[in-house]
Amino acid sequence: MYAPGMGRFLTRDTWGGAKNQPMSYNSWLYAYENPINLTDPSGFNPHCLNYHRDLCAQQRFYEIVAKDPFTAGKNLLTLVALFEDQELQTLWGTYAGRTVSKRLEWILHMTNGFPVGDITLPFPGAQFAYSDLFGTNDCYFSSEFRDNQFYQNEWKRPNSPSYSNQVGHFLTGVSLAYKNVFYLSEEVGIMNTGNLDLMIAHEKVTDHTYDPITNKQNPQIFAQIKNAQVTDQDVINFMNAIAYDDLGMYNERDQSLWNILNFGNNVPVGGADPNREGNSLQDLRLDVRAWRFAWWVRGHSGLSSSSGGAWLRSNLMR
């Protein structure tokens, strides 16, 4: 914190420094004593040049998700910070977006990609890039949207109790709804797939993305989604669920979504099928909120970026 009237800093930088940058260990030093050419409002990036504002915006993204102890790796709280951060708003807003619609588009750009082993699949709607940085413990989400509990029990991953990443799941749903038109590469084998159909299809087939031997994901999921049978009734159920959610009729919403899952009588409502990894009522609830958030942004595109954070706090956070 800087006090202009005193010309002094009142607090130290929270960053502990890096061994390859010796001057960074002085937590009272601003921008390596070069404030004419460098700017560092967060205290994390003394190399940021005023005339490279696009790169500074990207660097601030990484600071929020990976370095700042108050926001890094905190799943939903990290995403909220990307909408509410004042440095992105005031200094780098030209590139990160000052309105909620532009900020969302920038976040979707920064998180686009689906890493599979050492490659990234050509999957323009999947928002799982840097998902590990957001953290795989979904503790900041309301319990109705969390599915971590299933990975250790029903889906038999005893060494991965916090495998779930609901930020990536949520942003993928937002991307599909916000962009409104969705295409996949021929390399995946799917073309002109409806975005709503894809969202529903993902919850009708098991992920099969986890290989317990290699601990890597398997792109077979895309072929499975292609072959999933999404019926007209599934679409009607999902749209009804959106309406019920908007009206606060959550029991009716859950019943509509449960009908999409079609687990059968052996799985209690709200539970998970051991043979359908990644499919859950919790995910579909999050899909509904993703759809609503995307359309809320489209209808309030001129509001400040912080309004997006307020919406997420009100509708997703515990």
Image: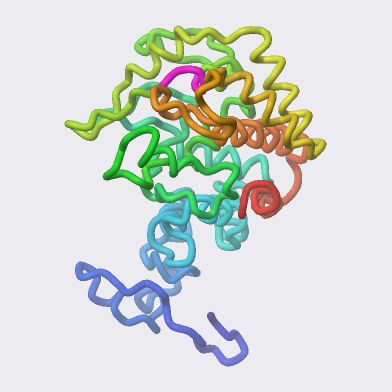
Task: Give yes or no for residue 315 being in the magenta stretch.
Answer: no
> Which residue is drawn at the image coordinates 23% and 75% (left, top)?
22
> x and y percent of residue 287 in the render?
60, 31
Instruction: Assign the magenta stretch its main secondary structure.
Output: loop
Instruction: Looking at the picture, tell me which residue is in the foreground, 260 or 37.
Output: 260
Q: Residues in magenta?
A: 202-206
Instruction: Looking at the picture, tell me which residue is in the foreground, 195 or 303.
Output: 195
**Vertically, is 162 above or below 237?**
below
Among the 4 quarters of the image, the one containing residue 85: bottom right
**Vertically, is 244 above or below 185?**
below
Q: Total marks drawn?
A: 0
> x and y percent of residue 117 in the render?
25, 31
> Which residue is drawn at the image coordinates 62% and 34% (left, top)?
285
Q: Residue furthest left?
A: 213
> x and y percent of residue 10 in the render?
51, 87
Left or right, 237 with reference to 115? right
Task: Give yes or no for residue 205 being in the magenta stretch.
Answer: yes
Q: How is the image coloured?
A: rainbow
> Which residue is drawn at the image coordinates 33% and 26% (left, top)?
209
Q: Residue furthest front?
A: 266
> x and y percent of residue 16 in the render?
32, 74
Among the 4 quarters of the image, the one containing residue 289: top right
